[in-house]
Image (tube, grey):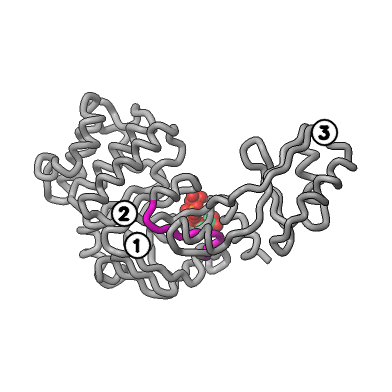
């Protein structure tokens, strides 16, 4: 459904590099996640797929149409939800929907079946101005507007950023239902926990794709010995762990700190003794299974070397 070959994009006369030789294939009916921190290049990639931005080099097709030459055909079949809320704040829910329906030469009634599940949740407030809606409701309205012309593919740029955890879960449940209807969905998120809701993910950092696969395969492929360490003076603890000669990485993780050692070795006993010597109290160290966040950090560090 999407084929991206060697796509690069720079800004400011080539001084800012947003995408570097990206290659990506997304299958029909897939729920595909682009996972990466702020500035990774996710929005640039979405805008290229949505035919709103020209790449500097490379080629991209959506449903077989070239994003440069066949942009008109792509716009008919793509539903795009930009990262920034981009609906008309001074129009009501109903007016926004009718407006987008008219643009695509359709009506709310014509495609009601597709948006029904989502629309019924905001319908009681249909006279309310979009600018006066909560984050979760704005997100549902934006999704309805992106679906109004029955797209084959949905491009959702950070739809859950800044939305409360309950609405985030609801939103992913809605995406599952849309996937069941055969719509291909490409969704970006900075939240690692959302990666598990995708069929496959691409981890992206500084304009480069670090890995593309299922969540499980990525974790398995880059498995490392990992330890969780807890102690009383957290700030000093992290500093001291990082100063230990065998430490490869140390990051705060919930109430603990996740530590990997150089060469994937187990130096936990030596580290424990080292920290005791530094005067740390209430120390606890245990072996843990890496999750996608740990794996992403590992890949990022390797990529930076
Ligand atoms: N119009 C622009 N002019 C100059 N630099 C830009 C422009 N748009 C994006 N950039 C830069 O390109 C890089 C990638 O940005 P992009 O918005 O694609 O990433 P992102 O992963 O979507 O991050 P965010 O969530 O912060 O938007 C960043 O360094 C960003 O500062």
Give the residue pinned by disc 3: 281
> Of 207 and 23, which appears nearest the observer?
23
The reply, left or right, for residue 265 in relation to residue 16 is right
Earlier along the polypeptide chain: callout 1 or callout 2?
1
Q: CA distance from mark 3 to mark 1?
A: 53 Å
Residue 66 visible to an observer of this rendering: yes
Q: Which mark is residue 49?
A: 1
Q: Quadrant of the C terminus?
A: bottom right
Q: Main secondary structure of the magenta part?
A: strand
> Of 305 and 10, which appears nearest the observer?
305
Q: Quadrant of the N terminus?
A: bottom left
The reply, left or right, for residue 132 in relation to residue 206 is left
Earlier along the polypeptide chain: callout 3 or callout 2?
2
Q: CA distance from mark 3 to mark 2?
A: 49 Å
Q: Secondary structure at mark 3?
A: loop
Asked if marks 3 and 1 touch (Cβ < 8 Å), the reply is: no
Residue 67 appears in which quarter of the rendering? Answer: bottom left
Q: Which mark is residue 185?
A: 2
- Choose mark 3 or mark 1, whichever is in front: 3
Q: Residue at x 37, y 48 (%)?
A: 82
Judge whether 128 appears above or below 74 on screen: above
The reply, left or right, for residue 94 in relation to residue 259 is left
Judge whether 64 appears above or below 140 on screen: below
Residue 98's spot in the image, x, y percent? Answer: 17, 39
Badge 1 density bin: few <14, some 14–19, many ≥20, Cα 10 Å: many
Q: Residue 101 colored magenta?
A: no
Badge 2 density bin: few <14, some 14–19, many ≥20, Cα 10 Å: many
Q: Does the closest atom of ligand 1 sit within 8 Å of the Cβ of label 3?
A: no
Q: Secondary structure at mark 2?
A: strand
Residue 56 appears in which quarter of the rendering? Answer: bottom left
Give the extent of the magenta segment.
198-208
């Amino acid at each position: 459904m999407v084929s991206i070959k060697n796509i690069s994009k720079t800004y400011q006369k080539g001084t800012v590099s947003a995408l570097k030789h990206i290659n990506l294939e997304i299958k029909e009916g897939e729920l595909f996640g682009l996972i990466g921190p702020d500035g990774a290049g996710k929005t640039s990639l979405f805008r290229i797929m949505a035919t709103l931005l020209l790449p500097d080099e490379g080629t991209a097709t959506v449903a077989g149409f070239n994003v440069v030459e066949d942009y008109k055909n792509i716009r008919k079949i793509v539903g795009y939800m930009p990262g920034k809320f981009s609906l008309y704040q001074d129009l009501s829910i109903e007016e926004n929907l009718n407006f987008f329906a008219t643009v695509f030469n359709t009506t709310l009634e014509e495609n009601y079946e597709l948006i029904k599940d989502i629309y019924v949740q905001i319908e009681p407030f249909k006279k309310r101005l979009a600018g006066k809606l909560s984050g979760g409701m704005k997100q549902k309205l934006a999704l309805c507007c992106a679906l109004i012309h029955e797209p084959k593919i949905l491009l959702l740029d950070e739809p859950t950023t800044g939305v409360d955890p309950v609405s985030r879960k609801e939103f992913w449940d809605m995406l599952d239902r849309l996937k069941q209807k055969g719509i291909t969905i490409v969704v970006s998120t900075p939240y690692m926990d959302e990666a598990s809701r995708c069929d496959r993910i691409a981890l992206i950092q500084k304009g480069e794709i670090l890995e593309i696969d299922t969540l499980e395969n990525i974790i398995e492929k880059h498995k490392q010995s990992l330890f969780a360490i807890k102690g009383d003076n957290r700030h000093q603890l992290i500093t001291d762990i990082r100063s230990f000669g065998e430490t490869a990485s140390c990051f705060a993780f919930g109430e603990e700190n996740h530590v990997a050692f150089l060469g994937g070795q187990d130096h936990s006993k030596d580290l424990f003794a080292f920290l005791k010597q530094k005067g740390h109290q209430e120390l606890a160290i245990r072996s843990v299974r890496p999750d996608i966040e740990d794996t992403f950090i590992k890949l990022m560090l390797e990529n930076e070397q």
